[in-house]
Amino acid sequence: MAKFLFPEGFLWGAATASYQIEGSLDADSKGESIWDRFSHTKGNIWNEETGDIACDHYRRCAEDVRLMADIGLNAYRFSISWSRIFPQGSGKANKKGLDFYRRLVEQLNSNKIKSSVTLYHWDLPQTLQDKGGWNNRDTAKYFAEYAAYVYANLDLPVDMWITLNEPWVIAILGHAFGIHAPGLNDFNIALQVSHNLLLGHGLAVKAFREAGRKDEPIGITLNLAPIQSLTEKPADLEAARRSDGFMNRWFLDPIFKGSYPQDMVEIFSRTFSLPATEEGDAAIIAEPIDFLGINNYTRILVEASGSEDAFMGNPINPPDAEYTEMGWEVYPQGLYELLIRVHRDYGPLPLYITENGAAFPDELKKDGTIDDPRRINYLQTYLLETWKAVEDGVPLKGYFVWTLMDNFEWAFGFSKRFGLIYVDHPTQKRYLKNSAHWYKKMISRNGLEA
Ligand code: FCB
């Protein structure tokens, strides 16, 4: 049997996000967030579900950390809910909100589980949305102030910090396609939001350096996808290049190269207004970071759309491929390609896979087991590609499964199960899926056997 071992000290984790698991929507003076508002607005979420209770993690946190320890995780990625810390978005901080995260980090530390803190995973305080949300440049400044408060007051060792989770998704799904909070449908706003998010990221990194948390790294998590062209025809290749510009380079380039990609500036400006910027923004956005977090689930295969001004090709779903419950193609070799490409084009910095995983229709059997061979196969094949990338020199330092436990999957409510742990939502009972047992074995070997 061949062994595929990872470097010593590799992080094996699982990831979550505050709104998707915590519940306790107004406990300890938490303020309203845009996801509270959005999920309570009829027609936005599958089956009119909300995150009011979610996995009740706010109250069951100790049990959940025990489960992480049972699975043998040596790292855990979670996000802080801004509106627990600043119920009004800015102004007076709410100490009780931060205490929850302090207890969580304490429990992680005492179980030798490294903590990876994301400062923003989509739950903007509603009061800031009322002032324009991420379309308002001031939100970037408020974000950095909130971040600075957390740096100064979460006074326990933290292993890694992530400013934003997936600015592309925030900007595009939230402001151009209206399927995420705050539910807007305006591409001009989405472009401005992308700029203000990047600015908020840069300001939060600057604030971090000033806070003097010396041995702790900070980075950002981007959703990135390998983009492929259906054929070698010039029009399809051009569609793939633009799709890559829209999905990947629009965020990677300003962070690592100090400017937006010129081809996309030109294409966007044919149809939309480019974001308003101020002198000095580019340098703030390119403030050096210590690592890049990559979320990847699938590839994007495109053909030309036929329109000269299109910034994205037509996506193609090959008929003979396997798809997850999200309709996402299982395409593990894409992760290899992506890791090699990011490393080649954006430099030597450490990389983490901060999310990768799959939703399948899991079934809880009478004996309390969940047999999820397709998830095991997904994780195993993606990890094998990850291993190859490490062998080929990519400085990848860790891998986080999305997700620890079945949770509120945004517009899909509870209909998509991504967890290593099955959650029976009516009773809140947790059950380890077979994939959790598989992951535990893999972690104990620090690699795969195949
Ligand atoms: C990512 C999100 C995460 C989860 C997974 C399935 O885009 O960061 O919260 O929804 O997709």
Image (tube, helix red, strand yellow):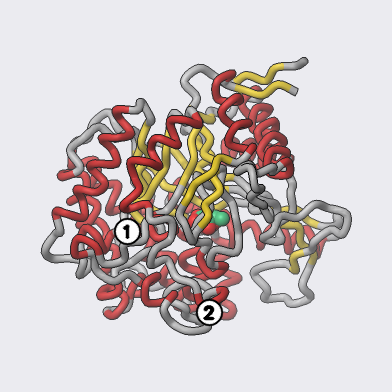
Q: Quadrant of the C terminus?
A: top right
Give coordinates of residue 153: x percent, y percent: 16, 45
- Left or right relative to 75: residue 45: right
Establish if 306 lies above or below 148: below
User: Looking at the rendering, which quadrant does residue 448 occupy?
Assistant: top right
**Front: mark 1 or 2:** 1
Q: Is residue 208 above or below residue 326?
A: above
Mark carried by residue 272:
2
| Residue at the image position 38 percent from the left and 56 percent from the top | 56
Would you call the spot at circle 1 few (<14 residues within 10 Å), some (14-19), or many (20 or more)? many
Q: Amino acid at mark 1?
A: Gly
Q: Foreground: 254 or 384?
A: 384
Residue 49 appears left or right of 303 = left
Give the camera-side residue of 136 and 59. Answer: 59
| CB of mark 2 near ligand 1 (< 8 Å) | no
Q: Residue furthest right?
A: 320
Residue 283 shows up from this direction: no
**Residue type, numbered disc 2:** Phe
Where residue 339 sits, quadrant-wise, is: top right
Image coordinates for residue 413, horizontal then vertical, percent: 53, 67
In the displayed image of the protein, which residue is found farthest to the bottom? 42
Return the residue at label 1: 200
